[in-house]
Image (tube, helix red, strand yellow):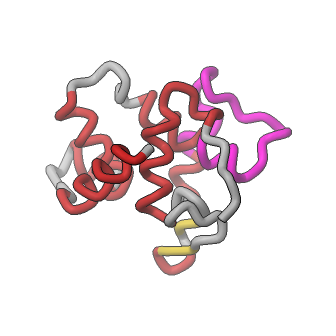
Amino acid sequence: MEEIDYSPAGPLARVVRAHAIIESNESLYAVGDGGQALGLLQIHPGMFHDYYGRLLEFPALNSDTWVEAWIKTTATFHRFHGFLTGTEDHQHLLVQAYNKGFSAVFSHGQRNPEYLSRWLAAFKTC
């Protein structure tokens, strides 16, 4: 497995890496959800469109590789929704929202405790 640089995620590098571990086992070539979720972080096109380049902290650059773009997209998702400033409970909901969708978790009350448990275990190893 090749070494992946998570530094484009800045202070969220460990958060992003934990997602990569459980989403793809850090595989750059993973495909899931019937071909809709791609790469290291299993990002759907809609999420990529919504978050890549949305914050100046994680700008979309012409020089970004796909890996850098995926990392920035995931970091933006968490930063935009207050991961670094939220309570632990809020952070745990955001982790689940990464998997189930923001609206599913925050508007419709859906949860994925198994995903959260796997993410927490991965986060401890980062």
Q: Residue at x 23, y 55 (%)?
A: 117
Asked if 85 appears above or below 80 in the picture, the reply is above
Q: In the shown orientation, is residue 63 left or right of residue 20?
A: right
Towards the viewer: 98 or 124: 124
Q: Residue at x 43, y 49 (%)?
A: 18
Please provide percent x and percent y for residue 113. Answer: 18, 57
Asked if 60 appears above or below 103 in the picture, the reply is above
Towards the viewer: 109 or 2: 2
Spot the residue most to the bottom.
34
For the N terminus, which image quadrant?
A: bottom right
What type of secondary structure mainly makes up the magenta span? loop
Quarter of the image holding residue 53? top right
Q: Residue at x 29, y 58 (%)?
A: 118
Please provide percent x and percent y for residue 126. Answer: 44, 43
Please provide percent x and percent y for residue 122. Answer: 37, 52
* Residue 46 sits inside the magenta stretch: no
Asked if 41 appears above or below 31 in the picture, the reply is above
Q: Give the residues in magenta.
A: 50-71
